[in-house]
Image: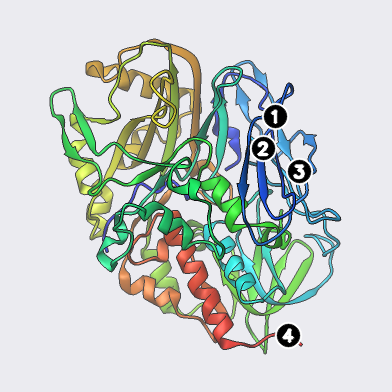
Amino acid sequence: MKFSSLLLTAFVSLSSAHYVDEEPENRFYEKPSDNHVRSHHTSEEPAESRYNEGPSEYQVRSSHHKSDAHERTHHEGNNSNNLRGGPSAGNGYAHGRSGHYHGNDSTEPRAGEGRSVQHDVLIIGAGAAGLSAAHELEKHGWTNYKILEASDKIGGRTRHEWSFGENDEEYNVDLGAQYIHTTNDIGNGKYTGEDRAYNLLQEMVSYPLEEAFKTTYTKKEFPNICVLPDGGCNDVYHNPPEYRWAGEMGWHSFLTEYVAYDAVRNNVINNCEVKAINTQGDDVSVTCGGTTYTAWYVIVTVPMKMLQKNTITFTPSLPSSYTQAINRFIIGNGFKVWIEYQAGAEYKEYFTHTTDLAMYRKSWYVTSPAIAAEAGYRLFWNEGYPYGASTKIVGGLIYGKAYNEYDGLSSEQKKKKIAEHLEKDGMVYGTPTGRWTVMDWKEEDYIEGAYTIFANEADQSTLLEPISYKLYFAGEALNEWTWGTVHGAAKTGRDQAKKIVAAGRRRE
């Protein structure tokens, strides 16, 4: 299917994110008795808890530390407020509102320690595909695996930030993947009922999700997009309307809490940039830092841009059919931006400028590299839609061809040009508060792009076939029906894990 979706999953160091300096609160997690509680604690008193019946138990522990590798630049100074979580005596973990995960504290060999360990499966990358592959392995009782992640976090091209709001009003901004794209899969008979968002999410986990995913955590999007200044609001955005996260929950939270429950999280090894994969001989060896890991199988889920840059050396070399397929994918660049306005600001729910309409429409069905070169969008939306009319934040996605105008600019320069664009022909009537955030995915280490804008089905099929029944690939670019989405990436990870389980070879 040649539809390029508004994924933004795939969307992580926040060196490119700018906003007014304020101290985010901690978010803690625990699981008393049989329920998984997620509470928002403030320095004064905790908010209400949210329960989830997950497959395992949790314990709370957290600590603040300064992240040198992932610095956030604020208008009033530099500050990073990350939490470190990992398995304690009770298999606990913790998150902060920054959404950063910093690996586990287990006794397993870490990158650079120069020791070898043996496993059934090694998964390269802790994004949607990698975490979902691990989830599927756990479902079938395959627990002898490791996820090797180059960065100090998990979640791939998802991230969230609590950047706006005062006192008790805090708004969860999805720096990466944001929408629940239920429309793309209609062609293969999925997600057509009123509970289609819930059904899509339920398919991603192996235990029952709470009813709140039908009501509290998701919300049907506004159906139309306005073409300003004079095109009206009659263009359909998605048909039928899709869903967006309703503030408290988002793709990053769902992936890192529900897909990557504690058993999965505890098998992540962070700061482990894989440089070499050797499939000669009976098993597979994977090298990161000074450590070599061995296994029967390896699933590579790194972004397609990383494969195209040959950041991993394969021995023996990949077959030419695989390398040619890899290089035919086109990954669009993109950044997201949010600008807060004072009370009384006016703007539409979804909108674009009439001069961007042709480019936007080309992105609906990208069937060739030539169309991909002309496709893209500069789309904007009411970020406060899940919160109510009092929240005045405009969000935007600049992707594909539209990105070229901003390439090479600083975050502040990008924001300034966007603010000027929003004032053009009165797309937004209002006064900015001075709070804003920019997240540019082209500038992210180990990612260097937004998501797929063109893929050939034959190339996808090629890469989904294992090499020597040991080397597997998965990721958002490889889903035929819905490339560029979180759930599409997750499905490829699950499917490859199922193939390995069916093969059945495990280390004795």
Circles 3 and 4: CB distance less than 8 Å? no
Near mark 2 (Cα within 10 A), the count class, few <14, some 14-19 or many ≥20, is some
Under mark 1, the amino acid is: Pro
Under mark 4, the amino acid is: Arg
Q: Which residue is mark 4?
A: 507
- Indicate the position of residue 355 as horizontal and vertical percent values: 19, 31
Q: Tell me which residue sits at (48%, 73%) in the image.
A: 495
Under mark 3, the amino acid is: Arg
Using the rendered view, name the quadrant where residue 163 is placed. Answer: top right
Q: Is residue 412 above or below residue 28?
A: above
Image quadrant in which the C terminus is located? bottom right
Q: Which residue is mark 1?
A: 46
Q: Which residue is mark 3?
A: 84
Q: Nearer the viewer, mark 4 or mark 1?
A: 1
Marked residue nearer the N-terminal end (2 or 4): 2
Marked residue nearer the N-terminal end (3 or 1): 1
Give how far apart the Cα atoms at labels 3 and 4 are: 32 Å
Residue 297 vs residue 261, the one in the foreground = 261
Say left or right for 499 vs 68.
left
- Indicate the position of residue 266 as horizontal and vertical percent values: 73, 59
Using the rendered view, name the quadrant where residue 65 is placed. Answer: top right
Marked residue nearer the N-terminal end (2 or 3): 2
Q: Tell me which residue sits at (65%, 64%) in the image.
A: 275
- Tag 3's secondary structure? loop
- Tag 1's secondary structure? loop
Q: Which residue is mark 2?
A: 39
- Indicate the position of residue 171 as horizontal and vertical percent values: 52, 28
- Indicate the position of residue 315 as horizontal and vertical percent values: 61, 78
Circles 2 and 1: CB distance less than 8 Å? yes
Under mark 2, the amino acid is: Ser
